[in-house]
Image (tube, rainbow, N blue to C red):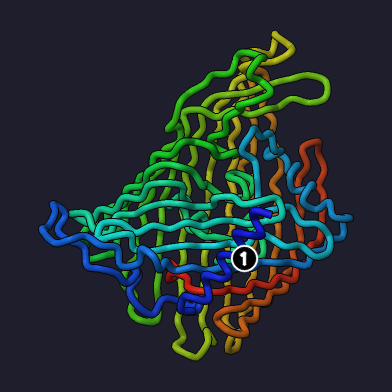
Amino acid sequence: MRSAKFFTGALAALCLTSVTPVFAQPTGPVQPEGLQPFPLFGSSRQITSGTAFNPAISVILDGKYYTDNRRGEAGEILEHAAGFDGHHGDHDHGHGELSRGFNLDETEIVFSATVDNYFDAMLNLAVDEDGIEVEEVFGVTRRLPAGLTLKFGKFLSGIGYINQQHPHDWDFADQTLVYELMFGDHGINDIGLQLTWLPKLPVYTLFGVETLQGRNEGIANTIDHGAADFGGLRERSGPRLFTGFVKVAPDLGFDHALQLGLFGGGARLHQEDHSDDDEREYLEGDSWFAGVDAVYKYDAGRSYGHGNLTLQGEYIYRVKDLRVAAADDFDEIGDKEKFKQDGFYVQAKYGFAPRWTAAARLDMVGLYNRIEKDARTDKFDDSRRYSANLTFNPTEFSRLRMQFNHGDIAQEGGGRENYNQFFVQYQIALGVHGAHKF
């Protein structure tokens, strides 16, 4: 009932706001319109909020028809990919597992505004049948000296490229394998601080560092229940996860754009639950990751994206250095397990006609895939997935997509499992939406 009232109220508010394209690329300043910032060290003028009672509001509906050739168990096959078999604690959650047939994914309700001369703010709520979740809520400074910007709250980390995108920004109906298996379906989405620096250089170069609470299932997981009365596991206050990134974008003229990125991070506490029906076992230690990303875009200058081309890819390497901290078998306590894995994706999207795009993607994880233990090293095969889709944008407010996936997944116990997936996706956008990042 609460979700229904909130959703109805948000739709009513839309009637009072202006409507601009949600999926359109930016045609003006990236920063929202608002009052010009005062000097950093104050002013005698009165401070007011130009949009205090008129925030930009958007609602994005996302639904799918889904089927596969494994009686709906394709997702389960993926969860047991060799070397990546999920052992999560309290923070594993996704954008919703799909059932065969019709699915309503999370509906995003976004509020954004210029708070005053010093801060912008954004709230992103994800609404589904189970309730409302805060996807992002943060403030960001409008102008600090020397090209610095500070973001604070809960936000998507600036590492990589696709990590900063919400599902409606993806070029495919699902998350990439490397992100899903290493960081979870949400990627790194945490509470903390982000500081970026954009120095005055001949080439666009952005540096960023983040200090985060550390609540990511793949790299900074903590176990808060089940093992509390079992002993052996440490409790460490946040922040526990630290990341950094640099992005470089050389000037290639009006028609071409290129962005290259380097990123990494480390967690000073990562815990996993490896218990089964017979006995309890909990691992803990630290972890780190590093990666590179690249995006190239070509603007053909024709109407509605006809002839436009986008190429992008990312590679990530992850290490989890863990030990058995608590177990029913006391002889196992202290045993070391070091997980070393990597993965990448590459994809291409081409506008073959006005408003129509075709895209292809290759995902691979576990090219380097091993678990080093005290007595032995377990090596696993790689897993891969091939995807292709066709997307039609009737207007800037709507999107229709058909997608096919073929997965070839190495299994923990040996052997491989294959599956085929088919999606029909729709997205409907209402209201105002900020300009998309590069």
Label 1 neighbourhood size at 10 Å, few (<14), some (14-19), many (20+)?
few
Q: Residue at x 63, y 29 (%)?
A: 272
Residue 83 image point, x, y percent: 69, 38
- Residue 12 horizontal side relative to residue 243, left or right: right
Which of the 4 quarters of the picture holds residue 387?
A: bottom right
Nearer the observer, 423 or 65:
65
Which of the 4 quarters of the picture holds residue 102?
A: bottom right
Q: Secondary structure at mark 1?
A: helix
Q: Amino acid at mark 1?
A: Thr
Please indicate, yes or no, whether residue 23 appears anywhere in the rendered image.
no
Farthest residue in the top direction? Answer: 330
Residue 356 image point, x, y percent: 62, 83
- Residue 83 horizontal side relative to residue 118, left or right: right
Residue 347 image point, x, y percent: 58, 66
Q: Is residue 305 above or below residue 384?
A: below
Residue 40 image point, x, y percent: 16, 54
Residue corresponding to mark 1 = 8
Please indicate, yes or no, whether residue 113 appears anywhere in the rendered image.
yes
